Image: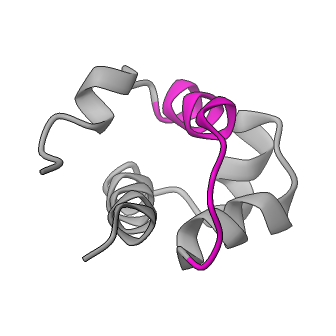
Amino acid sequence: MNIVKQIANRIVELRKAKGMTAETLAWTAKLSKSCVSYAEQGKHDIKISTISAICNALEISLSDFFKDFN
């Protein structure tokens, strides 16, 4: 699995674990709904600043986000 798809899957996993909708995540992260949607689809590269905003909204660190990546 490529890194973009791993990131996408991790975002979805963490969002669902927090009981958040994609729309709520977008609002909390101060991102557009389409930005979160693209990130969760894993079809496009994602900026580290976007991942950071998502991590802040999910109340986790970047290191926790990436801890299980190969």
Q: Quadrant of residue 19?
A: bottom left
Image: 2 above or below 46 = below
The percent coordinates of residue 33 (x first, y second) are 82, 63
Image: 55 above or below 39 = above
Q: Quadrant of residue 12?
A: bottom left
Image: 28 above or below 24 = above
Q: How is the image coloured?
A: one colour
Q: Residue at x 67, y 30 (%)?
A: 49
Q: Which residues are magenta?
A: 43-58
Q: Main secondary structure of the magenta part?
A: helix
The percent coordinates of residue 3 (x first, y second) are 35, 61
Name the quadrant of the N terminus: bottom left
Check if residue 66 falls in the magenta segment: no
The percent coordinates of residue 31 (x first, y second) are 82, 44
Tell which of 45 and 16 is nearer to you: 45
The percent coordinates of residue 51 (x first, y second) are 56, 39
Q: Residue at x 12, y 51 (%)?
A: 70
Image: 57 above or below 13 = above
Looking at the image, residue 35 sits to the left or right of residue 8; the answer is right
Q: Residue at x 44, y 25 (%)?
A: 59
Tell which of 66 and 27 is nearer to you: 66
Looking at the image, residue 6 sits to the left or right of residue 39; the answer is left
Tell which of 14 and 47 is nearer to you: 47
Count of residue discs: 0
Check if residue 53 falls in the magenta segment: yes
Q: Quadrant of residue 61?
A: top left
Q: Residue at x 60, y 79 (%)?
A: 43
